[in-house]
Amino acid sequence: ILWACTLIIGQATCLCCILGPLFWLDILKRADGQPGSFGGIHMTVIGSLLMPVAIMFAFQLFARQWPMIRIYKEGLQIREIGTPIPTDPVLNVIGIGIFIVILVAIWHLITLQTFRVKTIHLRWEEITNIMQNTGTLGIVGSPIRETRETFGNDVVPPTYILSYGPDSFGLATDQVSETIQHYRRSESARQSLRSWDDDFSLYRSFE
């Protein structure tokens, strides 16, 4: 889906942004020889509106070329792309939840929060829940040790609620959930995994 959206919107954006100004400035004309400035203005406006959306999809596609979740001996390394959009089931029931999500998504795009990439490290003992339901994987946890080492014992560690849909991984979400649950339950199985201290590309999310 992400590939399709990137290709379709990206091509439409390039087409409007290139042909729009050419028709607008009367460099190109319509097939009947008449000026196409009126249509060129519309194409330029549409291209300008589509451009940030196309950039967002292209960024999402690029950012997801690396594993979203890595399993280490100490815990999980999770890449959070963008800023999560909170949802309220009550608002969905009364029919305005989708409109609020759209407004928040537009605000994240304007404030560039959509292009944020953050690496979160959750030790096994800091993972409070792993949920798998109807193709959706949810991970809940608080990086207590990392937070206190950086900010002191008086700081309340943030709680991360991360949700992944069916197209987030190259595998089905139930397979990803089963693998994580297996290593979470079995300390002996984790001993065969590499340590994140040996991964030189690893960086602390609070540093």
Image (cartoon, rainbow, N blue to C red):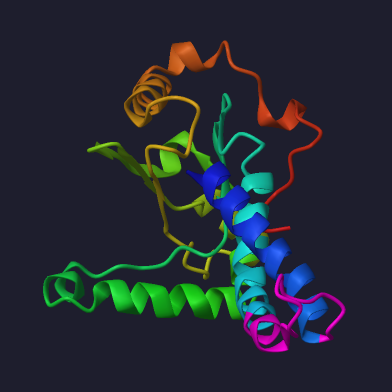
Q: In this view, does 49 lie above or below 116?
A: below
Q: Give the range drawn in magenta.
A: 25-42
Q: Residue at x 37, y 19 (%)?
A: 182
Return the x and y of residue 171 as percentages of the image width and height: 44, 24
Which quadrant is home to the C terminus?
bottom right
Q: In this view, does 62 lie above or below 21?
A: above
Magenta stretch: includes residue 27? yes
Front position in the image: 126 or 108: 108
Magenta stretch: includes residue 34? yes
Return the x and y of residue 92 as percentages of the image width and height: 19, 70
Residue 121 in view: no
Q: Residue at x 47, y 67 (%)?
A: 156
Going by the picture, which residue comes out furthest to the front?
A: 32
Return the x and y of residue 57 as percentages of the image width and height: 60, 56
Going by the picture, which residue comes out furthest to the right?
A: 27
- Answer with the quarter of the image where residue 66 lies: top right
Return the x and y of residue 25 as percentages of the image width and height: 84, 86
